[in-house]
Image (cartoon, grey):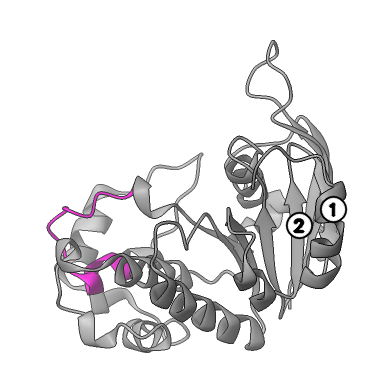
Amino acid sequence: MATLIADNLTYSYSKKSKPALNKVSVQIKPGTLTALVGPNGAGKSTLLKLLQGQNNPDIGDITIDGESLVRTRSQVALMPQRSSMNWKFPITVEKLVSLGQIKYSKSKNTNPFQIKALLANPKSWVNKCCELEATMQRVGISNLANRRLDSLSGGQQQRALLAKTLMSPARILLLDEPCAALDPPAKDDFLKIVRKLADAGLALFISSHDWGSSLNSYDQVVVLDKTVLASGTPNSIQGKLDDLNISSL
């Protein structure tokens, strides 16, 4: 089981700009569901990109079980915001999920012929430990395999993205605003799914604007506003809310 530790991370988008993150330290443990909450502009998405290795911190270290993230990046997967996806792209759910098998990196471009071959036959490259149908069943979308993306509800789209993320070998999952714009039943369903994933031993770090009762679904909560203002159990964080210097949550 993999534990990710981020120590004293500071990051700016340019040398002249103020830090988007300042001295941020977090720990993501296996079998734990952790919420990352904060206002717009708090740096939540920026932090997730650092933890996944898309960007490098100006200061600070990120390790997994004591090893540098550079060596262990394959153990971390990032599920992007639903709004960043083109849901009118003419492919099926099964084909979208199958794309999670492809390894992307900053230093090496993915072969377009690899993607074309995979889309032509999604099941052709699935290995025994990451089987396509089992992954879709795990998040409750096996019955949607042949549905086009543009026919899905918001909750179904999020589960499809989660299944795609689960197709990677990662044991640490970073989810960027997965419950945004979902109605309460869809949000509850999604939280039940990620709860089961955590109970199965995965480490999940989920950004959210929600400061409501759904936070009780999490084991730990990290409050971020460019720096970590508080962290702990939902009950302990809610008790500190009035003292936190946050403009809006």
Provide the major secondary structure of the magenta segment: loop
**Disc 2: which residue:** 222
Q: Residue at x 81, y 46 (%)?
A: 228
**Disc 1: which residue:** 230
Magenta stretch: give its range. Answer: 85-97
Vertical relation: 61 (above or below) 119: above
Vertical relation: 34 (above or below) 137: above
Q: Residue at x 62, y 65 (%)?
A: 212
Residue 40 at x, y percent in the picture: 58, 39
Residue 4 at x, y percent in the picture: 76, 62
Q: Are marks 1 and 2 in contact (CB under 8 Å)?
A: yes
Q: Is residue 4 left or right of residue 205?
A: right
What amino acid does circle 2 point to? Val
Mark 1, residues whose alpha carbon is within 10 Å: few (<14), some, or many (≥20)? some
Q: In this view, which residue lies farthest toward the top?
A: 16
Residue 163 at x, y percent in the picture: 40, 73
Vertical relation: 163 (above or below) 227: below
What amino acid does circle 1 point to? Ala
SS state under label 1? strand
